[in-house]
Image (cartoon, rainbow, N blue to C red):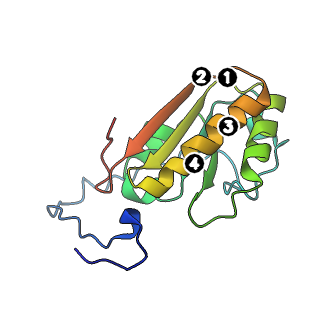
Amino acid sequence: MGNLGCGCPGSMARVIERETTEETNGFRAASELRQWPVQLHLVPPTAPYFKEAEILVCADCVAFAMGSMHQELLKGKALAIACPKLDDTAPYVEKLANIFRTNNTPKITVAIMEVPCCRGLDMMVREAVHQSGREIPLELVVIGIDGNRRN
């Protein structure tokens, strides 16, 4: 394993060994995406797809690491993606609180990677729920760099 020198364990270069698999009878998984845009910076808090919808707040890398992300996490939910390490996250807590407060959000799922920098997304969502003044059930899903759930 190599070190990029930036000090963040989540930025360490790693190779994930996988067995080569045959394509499964030409099967192509269907997208469960029900909206556009998906980037938290771009989604309007008043978008109709947030109205009374369960929301998946997802770290950008989750969809690439977890091959079954659409079927296991996204299906039936509105989506907002963000990167707590690379994005300017200052406005995110207020925006999420506004989404949760005005759309009667029944449940939130936060999906992050196992790397330390991703924990910031969970903390932002929890603070946004607090600022919304609502009690909303929240589920945290942690995905390993190999694409498997860690919890």
| Quadrant placement of the C terminus | top left
For the residues labelled 2 and 1, say whether their Cβ atoms are less than 8 Å apart.
yes
Please give the residue where the numbered disc 1 appears in the rendered image. 106
Residue 57, horizontal then vertical, whole percent: 60, 44
- Residue 127's label in the rendered image is 3
The image quarter in which residue 47 lies: top right
State how many labels appear.
Answer: 4
User: In the displayed structure, does residue 21 sit left or right of residue 100?
Assistant: left
Helix, strand or loop at disc 4?
helix
User: Along the polypeptide, which appears first: circle 2 or circle 3?
Assistant: 3
Please give the residue where the numbered disc 4 appears in the rendered image. 121
Q: Residue furthest left?
A: 19
User: Along the polypeptide, which appears first: circle 2 or circle 1?
Assistant: 1
User: Along the polypeptide, which appears first: circle 1 or circle 3?
Assistant: 1
- The vertical placement of 89 against 4, above or below, is above
For the residues labelled 3 and 4, say whether their Cβ atoms are less than 8 Å apart.
no
